[in-house]
Amino acid sequence: MRLIAALVADEEGATAIEYGLVASLIALAIVGAVLSIGNNLTPIFSSIATHV
């Protein structure tokens, strides 16, 4: 019974999971920003390539 109570009270794993979630959300935001910027730049580079 003490082992179960100790495992429930232990918060080290929860902290690691929280850091993992924060890191994954940041990575998702970066990927979204890069894809958005890439989609906006495609017509610009196509126009430049046509004029060259």
Image (cartoon, grey):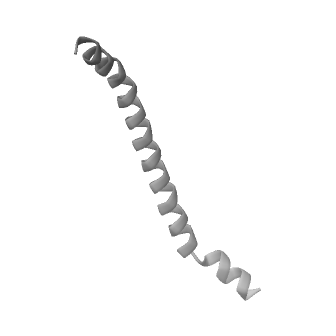
**Frontmost residue, 1 versus 25:** 25
Residue that protrudes farthest toward the right in the picture: 1
Nearest the camera: 21 or 50?
A: 50
The residue under the point 37% across, 30% down is 38
Judged from this view, the residue extending furthest toward the top is: 51
Vertical side of 23 occupied by 15: above or below: below
Q: Is residue 21 left or right of residue 29?
A: right
Q: Position of residue 41 (x, y in %)?
A: 32, 24
Quadrant assignment, res 8: bottom right
Q: Would residue 19 be found to the left or right of residue 38 on screen?
A: right
Question: Which residue is at the far left?
Answer: 52
Q: Measured along the vertical axis of the image, is residue 25 above or below residue 50?
A: below
The foreground one among 5 and 44 is: 44
Does 42 sit above or below residue 28? Answer: above
User: In which quadrant will I find the N terminus?
Assistant: bottom right
Residue drawn 33% across the image and 17% down it: 46
Rendered view: 28 above or below 36: below
Coordinates of residue 33 in the picture (x, y in percent)? 38, 36
- Going 23% across and 12% down the picture, which residue do you hit? 51
**Along the horizontal axis of the image, is 17 left or right of 6?**
left
Q: How many marks?
A: 0
Image quarter (top left, top right, bottom left or bottom right) of the C terminus: top left
Please tell me which residue lies in front, 13 or 24. Answer: 24
In the rendering, at what x and y percent does residue 9 appear?
61, 77
**Does residue 31 appear left or right of residue 47 in this picture?**
right
The residue depicted at 65 percent of the width and 83 percent of the height is 6
